[in-house]
Structures are given as C-alpha cells and as structure tokens.
Amino acid sequence: MSAESKLSELNLELPPAPAPMGVYKPIVIVGGMAYLSGHGPLQLDGSLMKGRVGSEVDQDAGYAAARQTGLAMLSTLKAGLGSLDRVKRVIKVLGMVNSDADFENHPAVINGCSELFAEVFGEDSGVGSRSAIGMGSLPGNISVEIEGIFEIE
Amino acid sequence: MSAESKLSELNLELPPAPAPMGVYKPIVIVGGMAYLSGHGPLQLDGSLMKGRVGSEVDQDAGYAAARQTGLAMLSTLKAGLGSLDRVKRVIKVLGMVNSDADFENHPAVINGCSELFAEVFGEDSGVGSRSAIGMGSLPGNISVEIEGIFEIE
Amino acid sequence: MSAESKLSELNLELPPAPAPMGVYKPIVIVGGMAYLSGHGPLQLDGSLMKGRVGSEVDQDAGYAAARQTGLAMLSTLKAGLGSLDRVKRVIKVLGMVNSDADFENHPAVINGCSELFAEVFGEDSGVGSRSAIGMGSLPGNISVEIEGIFEIE
C-alpha cells in the first residue's frame, strides 16, 4: 500500500507545512535525498507543543509531541515532493528531546515519530537509523525537535 | 556574482582555517559533497568567542559568534576546495548554541551564520536545511558550534 | 593492512552487535554510504558504561566509554557489511558527551572513538569530519553516544 493511501486509511491529518522560523529551508532535495530541517511538534491550529520532558510535561506528552513532529515532517515532505509516494525510505532521524538532566527514556519519546513513519512508509522502508538524545534547551521551549534524511525517487 | 567576488565586495576577512582540536579533519569531500566538522567562533587573532548564551553573554553576542563561526567555515571551505566558487549550495547546517535551560531564541542566534551564507552564496543556494538547538555544554565553553554539508562541483 | 587484519593484530574484541533500543535500525546502507545510528558504550557482557562526565565519572572514563562506543560501532559495521574491509573511509562522526554544564574537554573524550578508528582504518581513511558536543542528558545515563557516516564499497 502506498504512503498516501496509508495516510488516508489511518485518517491522519497533517498540520500545514511549517514556515521557517529563521533563515533556512524546511527541505532541500539533492542527489536522490531529501534533507529535512529540524521540525517541532506543530499542531493543526498552528501552535507548538511545549514543555521540558520529565519536569514540565511527562513522557507520554513527549511521545505525543514526537508523533506530532513526525506529522509536521510528513507535511513538509508532501509539500516539497508533491506526494509522499516519492519517499523510498527513511535513512536517518535525529530525535532531540528537551529534557531534564536526569531523564533517561529518550528512545521511548522519539518512538512517537518512528512508529508513525513505520505505519506510513512500512516496517522496512519506514524505519531508518536514528539517534535519540537530550538537549539542554530547544527553540520556544518545544518538547521535541527532529530532523531527518530520506531517500526519494 | 561569484562567492569569491561577493566575499571581496562585502570586505569580509576570513580567520585562518582552523586546525583540528582532536583526531578529525575539518573537511571531508566525498560524492560531490563537502562535510564540515563542527566549527567554533574563531577570530582573526586565533581566539574563540566564549560564554553561555543567556547568562554569560547575551543573544546579540551569540549572533555575532554564529556569524564568526560561519566565517571560519568559509575559511575551511576555501582551504579545502581551493575556491568558494566550487560551492554549489548549502545542503544542511546543524547550529548548536551553548545556552541556558530557559533560553528559547536559538534560531535568532544561528541566523548569524545563515545570513552570512545567504550573503556570500546567494538567497537560494546559500540557504539550506537547518536545525538550531541548545547544548548542555560545548568545548572550551565556546558560545556556538556549527557543522554543515555543502554540495560542491 | 586491511581493517580486519588490523583488528586481529591489535587483539581488539568487539561486543555483540547492539540490538535497537527503539524503532530504528542500527545501520542503513544507501548510495555507497553506511549510516550508523547513535551507539552507546556497549561492553562485552552486554552492559553499558554510564555516568555523567565531569561529576559522576571523570574524563578518562569518558574517553574509555568513547572507545568502547567505537568498538560497538565496528561490531555493527561488521554485522551489516559482512566485513570491516568494505569500509573505505570515515566521513563523519557526531560525538555526544553526557556532561555537566561546566565541562569543556569534549574533543579529548571523543578522541577515544576517533583514535580507535584511526588505528583500525588508518590515519587517513580512519579520520573523518567530526563534531564533539555536550548533551543535557542521554538514554539510560550512558556517558557517550556516537553516530557516524561511512563510505563503503
């Protein structure tokens, strides 16, 4: 099943493709790859999910923020490529969690994004390499920021 | 206008291409891409701009440090490629700010580097994908560290 | 001397190739490159080297953790490629140190991994571009997490 069909089947609603918050492009396409800028958990109403994971929001909220960030990345991919069906596979994801110094469950948080990609692009093509790490701070105190590299056709 | 001509026109002076602070190369060229190591805000006299953004130095100082880091990256590109005119475009920048836990304006800081690249390489080719994030600490307490990937010819 | 011969000569023992701690693949191969996920300092007995560098463990322990992380990355490369001799060179390493806000010697810590790669792959091919940075936190409080990109044949 194609990624676009899967998106419909799962009734996933994408937020509007995010506008840059600085001097950068949300997506750059070169040599059969799409490089996506760091995305935040942009919601349908245009607001961002905020709060440090561990103290200000809990791990479940972090997971939800990572999934929402994944939806924003899909929106950027669709806007940049015309169709999600042009994505051949996820190559790499850098999942950055705005978390306290004693937080230890970054992989469980970033799974929110990774499980979404597996649902939409499939268990093989949708699962790439990944790092999940804890940041000292993130722009606007968003809970999660994620960037990625995708192979496209 | 070529990047080298632009550099002259803007009277931008590049610091000496930075020597590695560990076991790495400042630049690796492979498959039409140049991968640049994390650079710091190296000044003409060889010193680095230091201090945590938010508490030890302010946001404007962070912006200046990001611009200076961009100049150091240009110096490495020029040394590695022979000429900045071999840069086709900026693909990706990872902008890391040494900042306090409550700092929220990382994109405004990293714009110091991104605006420089836009001036030198042009509004289209000079603007790539980007993540701007807050680090817990950086080597030698430098204010900013930035790495990048460039398409070259 | 080939990387596999070098590994034998140096009597280096690789830990078992690490299983994913979330929804990701340890290695993705695409377009002549191997993208490695963030690895931790996995030991022969399956345990991970933990503790924040600066306060909980010292810089030497951080160096040892970075070297052990490098061994885990070699194990993943060997499992994914069949032989380390397929590695043409190290392109890029992102070395992330779980460190206190006042820690300043990230490059010296990450050298633990970089010197290992130089020993195994050679002084030229084994040394790539690199960033060494300080994280607010890392999964399971591991001391170091490192991801990398390798050119392969």
Image (cartoon, coloured by chain):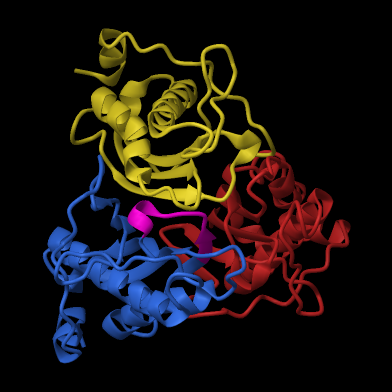
Chain colours: A red, B blue, C yellow
Query: Could you say which is closer to the camera, residue C51 or residue B14?
Result: C51
* Residue B46 horizontal/vertical position (percent): 16, 64
- For the point 48% across and 38% down, the residue is C53
In this rendering, the count of numbered labels is 0
Residues in magenta, as a range: B132-141
Please say whether residue A13 is visible from this viewpoint. Answer: yes
Q: Which residue is nearer to you in this view: C27 or C56?
A: C56
In the displayed structure image, the side of residue A127 where residue B13 appears, left or right: left
Q: Residue A48 in the image: x percent, y percent? A: 74, 72
Q: Quadrant of residue A128?
A: top right
Q: Eyeballing the image, is B40 above or below B27?
A: below
Please tell me whether residue B26 belongs to the stretch shown in magenta. no
Q: Pick whichever, A138 or C104, lies toward us.
A: C104
Identify the residue shown where x is 36% and y is 22%: C84
For residue B73, side relative to residue C42 (left or right):
left
Measuring 74% from the left and 67% from the top, which residue is drawn there? A50
Q: Is residue B135 magenta?
A: yes
